[in-house]
Amino acid sequence: MQSNNPVFNRSEGFNGRGTSTARATDPSQWKLDLDGSTSQPGPTHTSTGRGTGLMTIESTVEKTALTLGVVIATAAAAWFLIGDIATDQAAVQKAFGFAFAGAIVGFGLSLVNSFKKVISPALVLAYAVAEGVFVGAFSKVVAGYVGDPTIVFQAVLATMVAFGATLAAYKFFNIQVTDKFRKVVTISMFAFVGVMLVNFVLSLTGVLESGGLRGFNTLGLVVSAIAVVLAVFMLIMDFDFVERGVEAGLPERESWRAAFGLTVTLIWLYIEILRILAILRGSD
C-alpha cells in the first residue's frame, strides 16, 4: 500500500513495509471450527471496534475531533487575546505577530510530523496549538478587513459543507484513488506550496506588492480557488488512506497520523475559503 502523501509516506504500515496484520483473503488459509463455521487467521477487529489496539474508523474520528478541538480552542483564545483591531493599533500588530508566529511554528511542526517515522501524539497536538494561534489571528485580521466577524462563521460552515460533500461523494460514488491520482495531486500540492513560499519571501522583501499571488484581489481569488480544489483532492486522499490503514490493521497510534493529515487539510481548506469570502466581500 505505497503512499505518496507526505503525511503518510513515513509510516511503514501505510507503505507496506511493516508486518501486515490484515486478515487473510485466501480461503485455503481459513479454519473450520467444530460448529461448522469458518474463521480467518489474523485479528478479529472491525473498522469501528474499540479497545483492539488497532487503527479503526472510530479511533481516527476521536483523535481527529480532539485535534480539531485543540485548534478551535486555541484559535478562540488567540481571537480574544488580540483585542479590538478596529480601534487599537497595538491589537493589529499583535494579530499580525500571532499569525506570523503561529504560521512559522505550525509549518515547522507539520514538517516534523510529516517526516517522523513514528507519529507522536504530543507533536500532533503541539501542531494543533500553533495552527490554532495562526487561525485565530488570521481570522481576526480578515474579519477586521471586511468589517464583519460573521465571515468567520460563514467560512467554518462552508468548510464543514465541503468536508461533508467530499466524504459523501467519496462513499456514494465509490471514488477510486489510483496511483496516478495520488502522484498528480501530490506533485501539484508540492508545486503549489513551493510557489507560495517563493511568493511569501518576495512579498516579505518588498519585491512583490500587495501580497503578490496572495493579495485580496482577482488574482488572489483565482489562486485561492485553485487551492480549494487541491484541498478537496487531498481530502479524498486522506479518506482513502484512512480506509487502507484500517483494512491493513495498522497500530492504533497511526490514527494520530490520519488525524494529523485530516487536520492539515481542513485548516488549509478553511483558510482558502475565508480568503475567497473576504475577496468577494471586498469587491462589493
Image (tube, helix red, strand yellow):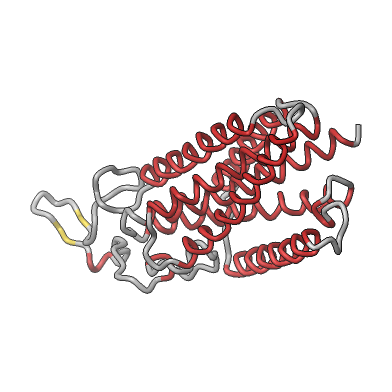
Relative to residue 8, is residue 155 drawn left or right? right
Horizontally, residue 123 falls left or right of residue 19, namely right
- Classify the position of the N terminus by image quarter: bottom left
Q: Residue at x 59, y 38 (%)?
A: 164
* Foreground residue among 175 and 143: 143
Camera-side residue: 26 or 145? 145
Q: Which image quadrant for residue 191?
A: bottom right
The spot of residue 6 in percent (x, y) is 54, 65
Residue 16 rendering spot, x and y as whole percentages: 39, 71
Query: Residue most toward the bottom?
Result: 17
45 and 146: which is toward the camera? 146
State the image coordinates of residue 166 (x, y, percent, origin top left). 61, 44
Residue 243 % position (x, y):
45, 53
On screen, residue 22 above or below 156: below
- Quarter of the view holding residue 192: bottom right
Residue at (31% x, 62% y) in the render: 22
Q: Residue at x 42, y 42 (%)?
A: 61
Number of numbered callouts drawn: 0
Residue at horizontal 71 percent and vertical 46 percent from the top: 272
Q: Is residue 208 left or right of residue 245?
A: right
Which quadrant would the C terminus be assigned to in this image?
Answer: top right
Which residue is outermost to the front?
A: 90
Give the farthest residue toward the left.
Answer: 34
Q: Is residue 265 above or below residue 93?
A: below
